[in-house]
Amino acid sequence: MSATTMAHDDAQKTLLDTYAALLDSVTQMHQLADNDQWADLIEQRTHYVLLVDKLRELDAAVTLEPSAQQQKAELLEAILEQDVEIRRQLIARRDELGRLINVSQRQRSLHRAYAPQQGRGAAFSDDDDQAPRSS
């Protein structure tokens, strides 16, 4: 086997190993989303983005043989399936947070609207306590 062939085989293996690492990363992200571990998911996303950047470079430099192309396609399909599920969960979380923000804003508006009246009501009861009483 020539040095060129060995280098090409190594490059293909590196590319496929990186796709496998990306699948591992996205699978872990999916598990974190399933467990509502949103902060950990964001941290894991950094690793995911670095792998995607590395793959972009490798994909541009490596030409895959048909069997390696098939492996890459299978890995990509699994990655995309996980990604779709993570996105679905993120959208559900975004919607949940939006509802919580709306409830909080309504409570704050109600408090602003009624708090001045409650203060006046307390002042009236204080005045009633100090008023002269008739016997």
Image (cartoon, helix red, strand yellow):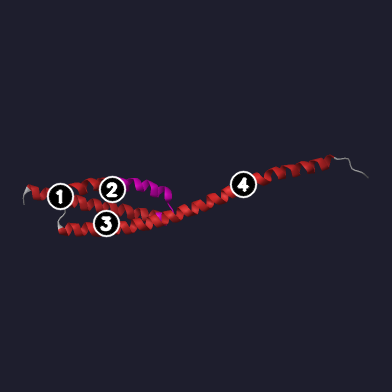
How many numbered discs, if any? Answer: 4
User: Who comes first in sequence, dot 3 or dot 2?
Assistant: 2
Residue at the (37%, 46%) spot, across then down: 43
Point out the stretch of residues depicted in magenta.
Answer: 33-50
Mark 1–mark 3 CB contact (< 8 Å): no
Between the C-alphas of marks 2 and 4, the distance is 45 Å
Q: Nearer the viewer, mark 4 or mark 1?
A: 4
Q: Which residue is mark 1?
A: 10
Q: Nearer the viewer, mark 1 or mark 3?
A: 3
Tag 4, which secondary structure? helix
* Viewer-closest of 77 and 21: 77
Q: Residues within 10 Å of mark 2 (few under 14, many from 20)?
A: some
Q: Which residue is mark 4?
A: 109
Q: Which residue is mark 3?
A: 76
| Left or right, residue 103 beside residue 76 | right
| Left or right, residue 64 beside residue 94 | left
